[in-house]
Image: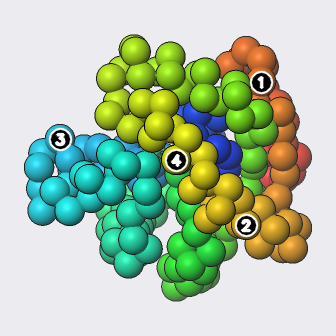
Amino acid sequence: MFNLILFGPPGSGKGTQSVRIAEKYNLVHVSTGDIFRREIKNQSPLGIKVQSIIEKGELVPDELLVDILRLALRQAGNPGGFVFDGFPRTLPQAADLDNLLMETGNQVSLVLALDVDEEEVVTRLLKRAQLEGRKDDTEDVIRNRMKVYHSQTRPLMEYYEKQGKFVSLLGVGSIDDIFAGICKVIDEKRA
Ligand code: AMP
């Protein structure tokens, strides 16, 4: 299995690129943010539980992520691998992912970070707020999501660097150029 984590702050383009990567390399795209948005839209018990957390830009508790992840892996059947988008976001989540993949003799293959500076990201997210009307794209919430990213998610860089799995790419420029850069790294890793 080839298991890729696309890493980066909110608004770095992970979602857009993940969809393209999954299509090209025949991987299953797992976006925990998309899963939560769908649950909220359906007002399922899980959706109701996480709605106010997400609207504040906080992280959903790790315990809930393990269950979601286990389900997503099971539902995928036997794919060539996964692209994880927006997951893991904390060290305990990274450990849970390692453990779940290990159950089937697999592991994280590569962590690709999209490097975009904070002001650029905030500008992009404010623009997305106008286009898509996401409730967590207001300026206050965006700033909070960046704070949460720095304090809880960035430490994962070191976790994966130590394992020699971490590669960072500049996430600025056209979507096609960034995608080409990503493909080059993936192809080298798979070669
Ligand atoms: P995203 O679309 O990935 O930016 O996710 C939107 C929101 O969903 C985040 O701001 C969090 O509130 C929540 N969320 C998504 N993925 C996770 C995760 N792995 N851990 C905790 N919360 C998450």
Q: Which disc number belongs to residue 41?
A: 3
Q: Are marks 2 and 4 in contact (CB under 8 Å)?
A: no
Disc 1, disc 2: CB below 8 Å? no
Image position, residue 156 (x, y; %): 71, 66
Which residue is identified by label 1? 172
Q: CA distance from mark 3 to mark 2?
A: 31 Å
Which residue occupies 64% across, 30% down?
Answer: 121
First in sequence: mark 1 vs mark 3? 3
Residue type (three-letter) at the residue carrying disc 4: Asn
Residue 80 visible in the shown view: no
Marks 2 and 4, how far apart at CA: 17 Å
Label 2, residues with CA under 10 Å away: few <14, some 14-19, many ≥20: some
Q: Residue at x 20, y 55 (%)?
A: 47
Task: Identify the amino acid type marked 2.
Answer: Pro
The residue under label 4 is 144
| Secondary element type, mark 2 | helix
**Which sits in the foreground, 139 or 66?**
139
Q: Nearer the viewer, mark 4 or mark 3?
A: 4
> Nearer the observer, disc 4 or disc 1?
4
Pinpoint residue 186: horizontal percent, then vertical percent. 78, 45
Q: Which residue is mark 2?
A: 155
